[in-house]
């Protein structure tokens, strides 16, 4: 099952990456920007928990987004934590990328068919909830 999940994940990820290419973002970067937009402001630790990814990987993925001016860290309330937030450029890039994301979604539904696509989305959500405990 692990092999099959990883294979499908790579294929779906490739479809999204290819479709998102004109936006200058990869699917993993888009997911990060969406998560940050939803919470508005979060520390690396909080964002890692939201995305279910380790902090080292998240920090490595944040680097290019910060250098591109899409994400910035801001002073925290206690002076120690440095929450992250989207910049205005990040909000604009996210809006552009979401248009391409919709194209990728449509392509995936076209390839899989609506019934299989909806069933897969439902089962993935249920499986994630079960595995998260």
Image: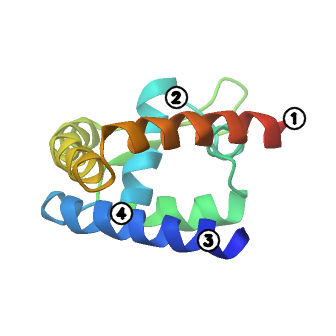
Query: Compared with residue 38, is residue 2 higher up or lower down, i.e. above or below?
Result: below
| Mark earlier in primary sequence (2, 3) | 3
Dot 1 alpha-carbon crowd within 10 angstroms: few under 14, some 14 to 19, many 20 or more: few
Foreground pick, 26 / 128: 128
C-alpha distance separating marks 2 and 3: 35 Å
| Mark earlier in primary sequence (1, 4) | 4
C-alpha distance separating marks 1 and 2: 26 Å
Quarter of the image with the N terminus is bottom right
**Cβ atoms at labels 3 and 1 below 8 Å apart:** no
Look at the numbered disc 4 and give the secondary structure of its residue. helix
Q: Which label number is shown at residue 4?
A: 3
| Mark earlier in primary sequence (3, 1) | 3
Question: Residue 77's quadrant in the figure?
Answer: top right
Look at the numbered disc 3 and give the secondary structure of its residue. helix
Look at the numbered disc 2 and give the secondary structure of its residue. loop
Instruction: Estimate the x, y position of residue 117 in percent, counting from the top left.
Output: 40, 43
**Cβ atoms at labels 2 and 4 below 8 Å apart:** no
Q: Can residue 85 be seen by looking at this rendering?
A: no
* 26 on left or right of 63: left
Query: Compared with residue 131, is residue 61 higher up or lower down, i.e. above or below?
Result: below
Per the image, the residue denoted by label 1 is 133
Look at the numbered disc 1 and give the secondary structure of its residue. loop
Per the image, the residue denoted by label 2 is 41
Q: Residue at x 29, y 52 (%)?
A: 108
**Cβ atoms at labels 1 and 4 below 8 Å apart:** no
C-alpha distance separating marks 3 and 4: 35 Å
**Cβ atoms at labels 3 and 4 below 8 Å apart:** no
Of tags 1 and 2, the one toward the viewer is 1
Per the image, the residue denoted by label 4 is 67
C-alpha distance separating marks 3 and 1: 22 Å
| Mark earlier in primary sequence (3, 4) | 3
């Amino acid at each position: 099952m692990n092999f099959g999940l990883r294979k499908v994940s790579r294929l779906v990820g490739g479809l999204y990456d290819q479709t998102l290419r004109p936006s200058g973002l990869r699917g993993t970067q888009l997911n990060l920007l969406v998560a940050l937009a939803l919470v508005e402001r979060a520390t690396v630790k909080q964002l890692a928990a939201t995305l279910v990814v380790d902090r080292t990987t998240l920090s490595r993925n944040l680097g290019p987004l910060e250098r591109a001016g899409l994400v910035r860290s801001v002073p925290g309330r206690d002076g120690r934590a440095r929450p992250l937030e989207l910049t205005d450029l990040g909000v604009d890039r996210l809006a552009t990328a979401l248009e391409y994301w919709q194209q990728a979604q449509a392509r995936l539904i076209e390839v899989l068919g609506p019934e299989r696509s909806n069933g897969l989305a439902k089962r993935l959500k249920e499986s994630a909830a079960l595995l998260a405990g």
